[in-house]
Amino acid sequence: MTEENRTYITHLKVTDVPWHRLTTAYGRGTEFPTHLAVLERMEDMETVKKSLDQLTANLEHQGTLWHATPFGMVFLSRILEKALAESGRNPAAHFLAGELLDFFACILQCFRDGDEMEHAEPLPLFSDLLREEYLWSEEYDEEEDEMRYEEDEVFPDDLFYSFYYYSWQAVKAYQDVLEQVPAEFAEPAAAVLELL
């Protein structure tokens, strides 16, 4: 991982990402900041479960990753770090830590599977994912989005592979967190580390 990409990953703020212009499995990532904030707070099990379900369903679907996925993984990696630290005293954090480790293994398996196939080179920089030509329209129009999906090349090859590559890099940047988990999470963390 280049130092430039590591710095970008570790300094990125939720407000730096134009979520409403990034594709997900079921539309766009407009609601991601709200769901990420719920997970960050880890206040009660019900809201944590709902927001986690929304995020995971939209970040990965049947082995496919989306434009919002690498950015989601940056913030989920930070949330995992916090959840692990609070898991001994907060049931919502404990639940979240276990669920996120399983989800990370799923995302990394998607990367592994994609990496084994013939693919384009990733974009040189994580930040390249936010170049204007890759972003969808400012205003959400479901019909317009559906028309765009009808095109032969919805995502250029290098952009599409970058959804996978930078999702892996987002987790890789927080590898040290996975190497220092509480003992009860050692097994799922080891599974994630093996895929890194």
Image: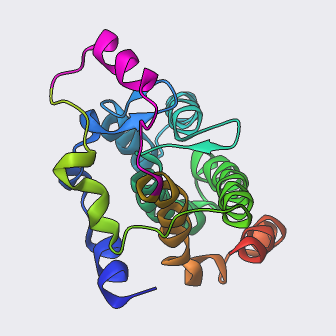
173, above or below 147, in the image? below
The magenta stretch spans which residues?
139-157
On the question of residue 82 being in view, the answer is no
Q: Seen from this angle, which residue lies furthest bottom?
A: 3
Indicate the position of residue 156 as horizontal and vertical percent values.
Answer: 41, 49
Report whether 155 appears left or right of 188.
Answer: left
The quadrant of the image that shows the C terminus is: bottom right
Indicate the position of residue 166 as horizontal and vertical percent values.
Answer: 47, 65
On the question of residue 138 being in view, the answer is yes
76, above or below 29, in the image? below
Near-viewer residue (159 or 17): 159
Indicate the position of residue 28 as horizontal and vertical percent values.
Answer: 36, 29
Indicate the position of residue 36 as horizontal and vertical percent values.
Answer: 39, 44
Residue at figure coordinates x 27%, y 47% from the top left: 134
Q: Is residue 83 magenta?
A: no
Q: Seen from this angle, which residue lies furthest top?
A: 143
Near-viewer residue (58 or 154): 154
Quarter of the figure with residue 189: bottom right
Residue at figure coordinates x 51%, y 61% from the top left: 167
* Protein image colouring: rainbow
131, above or below 126, in the image? above
Report whether 87 appears left or right of 35.
Answer: right
Residue at figure coordinates x 25%, y 42% from the top left: 135
Near-viewer residue (53 or 64): 64
Report whether 34 appears left or right of 93.
Answer: left
Residue at figure coordinates x 58%, y 39% from the top left: 56
Q: Seen from this angle, which residue lies furthest right?
A: 187
